[in-house]
Image: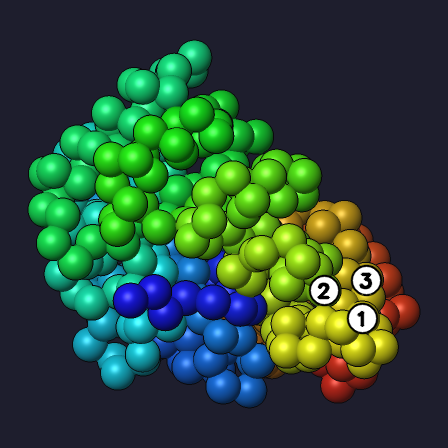
Amino acid sequence: MKTLKGVIAATPTPLNADLSIDIDRLIGHCRWLLGEGGCDGINLLGTTGEATSFSVEQRIAAMRAVAQSGVPLQRMMVGTGASALADAVALTKAARDLGFAGALLLPPFYYKGIDAESLANHVGEVIAKAGPFGLKIYLYHIPQNTGVPFTAEAIARLRERYPDIVVGLKDSSGDIAFSRSLAVQFPGFDVFPSSEGSLTEWKSSRFAGCISATTNVTGALSQIAWSDPDSENGRQAATSAMAIRGVLGGFPLMASVKAALAAMTGDGGWERLMPPLRRLSPAERAELFARLGKTDFAAEHAPATAG
């Protein structure tokens, strides 16, 4: 049974001063997202979570800590992609064994020019070595980062071979026409665009929801758009969410989302990023909040001092 639908936040990974993962802050943020934050689900350790900047051991340790925290895992998918097959297997197996609702699988992203059959074979090896029982895989299509797209041809092969395992896709390409075409071509295959702007068309386009970095900030507005997409209220909420998203996207996205969370929580430690990413400069930060001040970003979200 698939339990991931609606507004899903791709959560950032908070860091301690030594750049280790701040588990307590991560768990607290997950709880907030699923409550006051307005989200139906969470994508843990994805691109927004800087997952590929952490070791396999760090990622599994974070997964285990979240799993043991009591956060409802049926509302969480976790990024398990890696360039090395053994790493992808270990992460995917851990996600399933710990009880997460799904594994969000990147393609192997070092070698380019991978054809559909080779890509399908790679995913098949991950499934075989992790063990297929209870496995739910969501493909992660982000070709601007990986250089390796999950094409319709590759998806068709995977759906034919593993219809109960390869159950959906996160489309971070920004190509909404591609998202729409997949949802039509593959009935029962859950397609999640990466922008809140898709929420008002989820019924007509057959989307399962959206998975977005900016729903860490826009979750409550996005929930209105998802829950009531045909009403004026829903459309206005989507417009407000997209205005905030537009501001955040005008800066390095991981840094801007973390800066917004620092302001929202009063905890400047949120602004830390793993190298090679960096936090916003003071000038960038000032400009970010000046622009956010012209949106529905809550007035009480005054910037916090970076820690």
SS at mark 3 in the image: helix
Q: CA distance from mark 1 to mark 3?
A: 12 Å
Q: CA distance from mark 2 to mark 3?
A: 15 Å
User: Against 32, is 219 above or below?
Assistant: above
Residue 41 horizontal side relative to residue 87, left or right: right
Question: Looking at the picture, how far across and down is residue 207, in whole percent?
Answer: 57, 56
The label on residue 243 is 3
Return the disc, 1 or 3, that comes first in the chain's sequence.
1
Amino acid type of the residue tagged 1 in the rendering: Arg
SS at mark 1 in the image: helix
The label on residue 235 is 1
Residue at point 25%, 41% (across, down) = 162
The label on residue 200 is 2
Amino acid type of the residue tagged 2 in the rendering: Thr
Residue at point 55%, 87% (across, down) = 36
Return the disc, 2 or 3, that comes first in the chain's sequence.
2
Question: Looking at the picture, how far across and down is residue 128, in whole percent?
Answer: 12, 38
In this view, which residue lies farthest toward the right?
A: 294
Question: Looking at the picture, how far across and down is residue 88, in whole percent?
Answer: 23, 39
Identify the image quadrant of residue 24: bottom left
Q: CA distance from mark 1 to mark 2?
A: 7 Å
Residue at point 21%, 33% (across, down) = 124
In this view, which residue lies farthest toward the top?
A: 113
Q: Quadrant of the N terminus?
A: bottom left
Q: Residues within 10 Å of mark 2 (few under 14, many from 20)?
A: many
Residue 234 horizontal side relative to residue 44, left or right: right
Amino acid type of the residue tagged 3 in the rendering: Ala
Comparing labels 2 and 3, the label whose residue is closer to the camera? 2
